Image: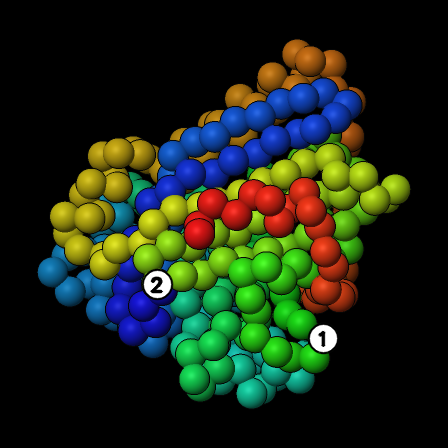
Amino acid sequence: MDLTVPQILQGHVMHKRLWPRINQFTYGIYYLALPLDQLARINDGWRCGYNRKALVSFYDRDHGPRDGSSLTAWIRSILAQHDLAHVNGPVVLVTMPRVLGYVFNPVSFWLCHDAEGQLRAVLCEVNNTFGETHSYLCTHPEGRTLQPDDVMQAHKLFHVSPFLTREGSYNFRFAVHPLKFGVWIDYFNPDGRAQLLTALTGCLAPLTRNSLRKAFWGTPLVGLRALALIHWQALKLVMKRSRYISKPSQLGSRLSRTLQRVNSPETAIRDETR
């Protein structure tokens, strides 16, 4: 991944529920990969509107503190609070843009590097369909770089799907290559049994008018489409008689951190970026 210029990620998102009702889907999708210190450049050549109305745009207020203030200051403060001040290199935000003024991001990824450009932390900013947000900070306890085979575990503390309880844990894995990007987030129930496998994988290219136009017409209304597909899959699960779980009140904390490195064969075998 180029840490110096805006890029576009074109790929696929995959979800597979293993039990008690099997349900699987794969959809095409695109994301923007935006170095925070290069955000103003996405206006160049009318590629993408930055904090202004456009066919495709990016607004600071859609992320972080949600008030339009500096995203760089926000992520730096989080890193400092978690003894990661040495992670002071480029930060790349991988996220879906606003299209025709609408945006819905199930999850955005803040890729945090050290001064040498090595990936040291990833903040997964998760949004549910109820307007709530929680972020999972993925790092190694010893602070070393994140490698494609590394799996990090975190308690599940945020209600996303109405068919999964707010219990158990997630396994996170990230593979960032010069031209490819992959994220795997798998859910395990409180007994340690894998129940939901998810992946986002794709190829990176420079963000240009042509590449953005191709992505836009290949996946029109990407955020609205993602929301519609979430509800369509929920309807399918209802039709399969999956148990519906009412949303609990959100916990007070909006940020949590991974616990330790784990090994998960179910995750490791699904690396599509090599």
- Of the residues under marks 1 and 2, which one precedes in the sequence? 1
Q: How many marks?
A: 2
Callout 2, which amino acid?
Answer: Pro
Identify residue for label 1: 141
Judge whether residue 31 can be spotted in this image.
Answer: yes
The image quarter containing residue 135 is bottom right
Judge whether residue 34 can be spotted in this image.
Answer: no
Outermost residue on the right side: it is 191
Q: Secondary structure at mark 1?
A: loop
Outermost residue on the left side: it is 45
Percent position (x, y) of residue 28?
38, 34
Say which residue appears at 66% left-offset and 58% top-offset: 151
Relative to residue 113, is residue 225 depicted above or below?
above
Callout 1, which amino acid?
Answer: Pro
Say which residue appears at 74% left-offset and 59% top-offset: 262
Say which residue appears at 66% left-offset and 29% top-offset: 17
Residue 32 horizontal side relative to residue 230, left or right: left
Q: Nearer the viewer, residue 98 or 218?
A: 218
Identify residue for label 2: 178
Q: Nearer the viewer, residue 76 or 196?
A: 196
The N terminus is located in which quarter? bottom left
The local crowd at label 1, few if under 14, some if 14 to 19, many if 20 or more residues have their Cα within 10 Å, is: few
Q: Nearer the viewer, residue 88 or 68?
A: 88
Q: Secondary structure at mark 2?
A: loop
Percent position (x, y) of residue 104?
46, 43
Q: How is the image coloured?
A: rainbow
Q: Nearer the viewer, residue 113 or 146?
A: 146
Say which residue appears at 68% left-offset and 36% top-offset: 196
Marks 1/2: CA distance?
26 Å
The image quarter containing residue 45 is bottom left
